[in-house]
Image (cartoon, rainbow, N blue to C red):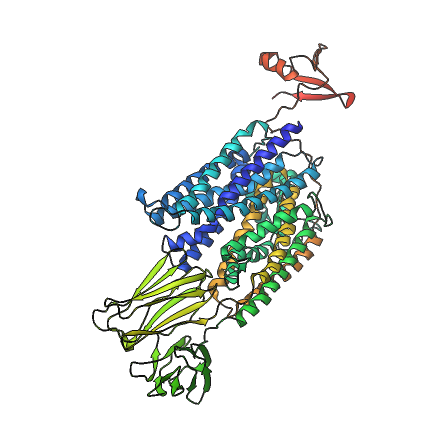
């Protein structure tokens, strides 16, 4: 019996591990695939990503209805796993160009099937694992199972977030420097393994079959009660303690009405839950963007922002054993609702920490001018300092080869002037003062390069207006600017090459407008890069190296004089990240503890408080609350009501604090119920086993008795199976004596 119990639990946990490994790995590289391979705009890719996540957490309701009313949890897990497998195969095939499949439509179909498959599985695996325990005798084991189950979920997610992106980056395939086909192909193998392991454990499972269509009865009973409530006389008053569902008791019976009251009381407790998930799920969006604004060099290794998502599952894995139900519990064992309240408050503190960090990031990052405002970015390519004045508004010195920022100014035309020493870096300037009118553009910066022409006169060169915003991925951005003359058929080109031998070339026009030509921004890997200038006649040529760091926005100014390369200066209008990655650890620590206290306790609460016939539906409603939490994030992001991300974090924290205080007040009025004894007659497991010490069976109509010992090859059920059904007694008395009890207590078996 103990071996059977362990084997069934192992198969269920192994199945969940493979599924989480597959899903989290696929989700980690999905947004990059949508943007880089399918060439979707970042906003469109974000919407597709969140719709996918919402589908994953909305489909559990469908799986729960099928499990509780039609085919049972085992078959739902099996069938939806097959749908999941087909979806991963389609997604993998969409990343293989030789197959000539339409990549966008194939990917969307694959993602829809994956969302359907993983969503249908979600509520059933946890409930199916809980079915393996007999309650209330094994309540302690059930609590440990949920802790181990959630630990497995995070271990699978942790491994997926590390292995799948590594597979994508470690190989080159189909002419690309990354291999999404390999990244999507590994989840296919994992889903297939999960199906094999799950089916292999069937002989050890306790499989409960649905007795009747509970959902239809649930809806019908609720609708009937509402109609009776609405049709009552206006003068009629409700009795004290009367529930609105009591109006349907006469038609549907007390048992169904009692179960529905329990479910509605649980759903009522779920009302504040989506606010928690709206904060928690921002680890993959807002917090990732925040991480891209931090300096992420650790022991000489540069971590990418999306890699920081592994901090949460890693911390959960480390802390779950120290929580109630774990191997080394340090925290007191509290009721589930109290633990959920504590978890919610810790999540609110995590967002306060995120808001404080965001304030520091905003103070150290170049802020785009607001409406009706503008700013100047001055890039000095001269080897001497320059003094710049902007009308009567402001004046600022610019160091040799330096960068200066002047903002904010009202959006209107200005006369700007610059003056340098007559002798600049050993060269006599024929003109050391320059004045020019500048027409500004609102909500952007006006970048101005200070240089000299071939006549040794100081000169302004105006770049296109720009915001100089940092990349969403956190990688450094580089723009190449060529200043000077080129002449016909010179074919000047500037090549930038990274340490990984990846290069990008900018071809300068033979007749640049106003003697300046600029490339678009390139996204580079942090570290050193090499640049090289070439021309057809070989006159304008040169090379050098530069260093770019995470979060920096750079401009490489290459200046020509008298047909020769005169200067090359690397400027950083928006400097690289200053705050270190360690400052984000406290909020991840708080949100990880909050997840353990809130999510594990929520699953335990949903399973133990729900009636036996509606456990899966109740757990599905828990997962649907995650979908509503993602919807809140999308609505807030689309309305764009917050100018500061720090303010947004503080508002989220306040929202969760208020909702948790409401949740605490609601929990004080909730009356916890004792778990029902687990003795379902619908299990596919024998009621009597051949290892009983003595079993005697006799018909109540006769005095004939058959005694079977434990050593006999026959058993009570075995004799009945071999006998003709017409020979079965209509009613029988069974006396059972086990090794732990010598009391021969009669049990009556009635045959339908």
Q: Please give the name of the residue rendered at 63% of the width and 54% of the height, measured from the top-left corner.
A: 594
Residue reaching furthest right? 742
Q: Is residue 339 left or right of residue 480?
A: right
Residue 215 visible in the displayed image: no
Q: Nearer the viewer, residue 735 or 604?
A: 604
Residue reaching furthest top? 704
Q: Please give the name of the residue rendered at 68% of the width and 51% of the height, measured from the top-left corner.
A: 339
| Percent coordinates x, y for residue 481 in the rendering | 34, 71
Could you tell me which quadrant the N terminus lies in? top right
Tell how many labels. Answer: 0
| Percent coordinates x, y for residue 392 in the rendering | 44, 90
Residue 674 visible in the displayed image: yes
Q: Nearer the viewer, residue 37 or 261?
A: 37
Q: Nearer the viewer, residue 659 or 289?
A: 289
| Percent coordinates x, y for residue 22 in the rendering | 49, 43
Residue reaching furthest front? 426
């Amino acid at each position: 019996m103990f071996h059977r119990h362990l084997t069934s639990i192992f198969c269920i946990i192994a199945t969940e591990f493979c599924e989480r490994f597959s899903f989290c790995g696929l989700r980690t590289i999905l947004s990059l695939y949508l943007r880089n391979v399918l060439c979707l705009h970042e906003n469109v890719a974000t919407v597709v990503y969140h719709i996918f996540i919402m589908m994953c957490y909305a489909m559990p309701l469908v799986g729960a209805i099928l499990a509780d009313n039609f085919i049972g949890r085992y078959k739902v897990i099996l069938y939806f796993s097959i749908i999941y497998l087909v979806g991963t195969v389609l997604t993998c095939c969409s990343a293989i160009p030789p197959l000539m499949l339409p990549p966008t439509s194939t990917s969307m179909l694959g993602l829809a099937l994956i969302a359907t498959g993983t969503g249908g599985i979600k509520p059933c695996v946890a409930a199916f694992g809980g079915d393996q325990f007999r309650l209330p005798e094994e309540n302690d084991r059930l609590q440990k199972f949920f802790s181990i189950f959630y630990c497995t979920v995070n271990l699978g997610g942790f491994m997926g977030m590390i292995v799948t992106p590594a597979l994508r980056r470690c190989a080159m395939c189909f002419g690309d420097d990354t291999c999404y086909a390999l990244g999507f192909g590994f989840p296919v193998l994992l889903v297939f393994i999960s199906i094999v392991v799950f089916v292999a454990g069937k002989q050890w499972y306790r499989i409960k079959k649905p007795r009747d269509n509970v959902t239809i009865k649930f809806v019908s009973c609720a609708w009937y009660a509402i109609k009776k409530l609405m049709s009552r006389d206006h003068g009629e008053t409700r009795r004290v303690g009367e529930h609105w569902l009591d109006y349907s008791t006469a038609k549907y019976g007390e048992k169904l009405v009692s179960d529905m009251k329990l479910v509605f009381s649980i759903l009522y407790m779920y009302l504040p839950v989506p606010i928690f998930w709206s904060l928690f799920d921002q680890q993959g969006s807002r917090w990732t963007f925040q991480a891209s604004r931090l300096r992420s060099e650790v022991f000489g290794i540069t971590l990418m922002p999306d890699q920081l998502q592994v901090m949460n599952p890693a911390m959960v894995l480390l802390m779950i054993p120290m929580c109630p139900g774990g191997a080394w519990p340090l925290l007191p064992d509290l009721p589930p609702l109290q633990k959920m309240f504590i978890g919610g408050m810790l999540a609110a503190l995590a967002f306060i920490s995120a808001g404080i960090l965001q304030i520091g990031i905003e103070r150290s990052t170049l802020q785009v001018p607001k409406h009706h405002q503008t700013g100047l970015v001055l890039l000095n390519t001269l080897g001497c300092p320059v003094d710049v004045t902007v009308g009567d508004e402001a004046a600022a010195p610019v160091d040799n080869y330096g960068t200066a920022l002047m903002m904010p100014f009202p959006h209107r035309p200005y006369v700007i002037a610059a003056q340098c020493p007559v002798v600049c870096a050993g060269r006599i300037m024929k003109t050391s003062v320059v004045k020019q009118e500048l027409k500004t553009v609102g909500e952007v910066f006006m970048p101005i390069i200070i240089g000299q022409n071939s006549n040794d006169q100081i000169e302004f060169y105006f770049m296109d207006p720009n915001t100089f915003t940092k990349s969403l991925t956190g990688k450094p951005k580089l723009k190449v600017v060529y200043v000077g003359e080129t002449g016909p058929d010179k074919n000047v080109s500037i090549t930038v090459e990274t340490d990984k031998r990846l290069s990008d070339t900018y071809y300068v026009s033979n007749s640049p407008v106003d003697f300046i030509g600029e490339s678009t921004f390139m996204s580079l890997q942090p570290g050193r890069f090499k640049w090289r200038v070439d021309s057809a006649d070989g006159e304008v040529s040169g090379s050098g190296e530069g260093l770019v760091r995470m979060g920096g926005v750079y401009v490489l100014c290459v200046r020509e004089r008298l047909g020769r390369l005169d200067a090359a200066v690397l400027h950083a209008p928006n400097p690289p990240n200053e705050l270190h990655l360690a400052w984000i650890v406290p909020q991840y620590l708080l949100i990880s503890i909050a997840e353990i206290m809130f999510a594990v306790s929520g699953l335990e609460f949903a399973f133990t408080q729900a009636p036996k016939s509606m456990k899966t539906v109740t757990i599905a409603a828990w997962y649907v609350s995650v979908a509503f939490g993602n919807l809140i994030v999308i609505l807030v992001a689309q309305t764009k009501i917050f100018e500061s991300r720090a303010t947004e974090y503080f508002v989220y924290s306040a929202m969760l604090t208020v909702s948790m205080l409401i949740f605490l007040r609601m929990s004080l009025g909730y009356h916890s119920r004792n778990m029902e004894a687990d003795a379902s007659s619908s299990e596919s497991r024998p009621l009597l086993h051949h290892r009983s010490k003595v079993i005697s069976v006799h018909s109540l109509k006769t005095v004939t008795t058959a005694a079977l010992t434990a050593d006999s090859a026959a058993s009570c059920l075995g004799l009945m199976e071999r006998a003709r059904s017409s020979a079965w007694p209509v009613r029988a008395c069974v006396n059972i004596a086990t090794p732990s009890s010598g009391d021969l207590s009669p049990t009556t078996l009635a045959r339908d």
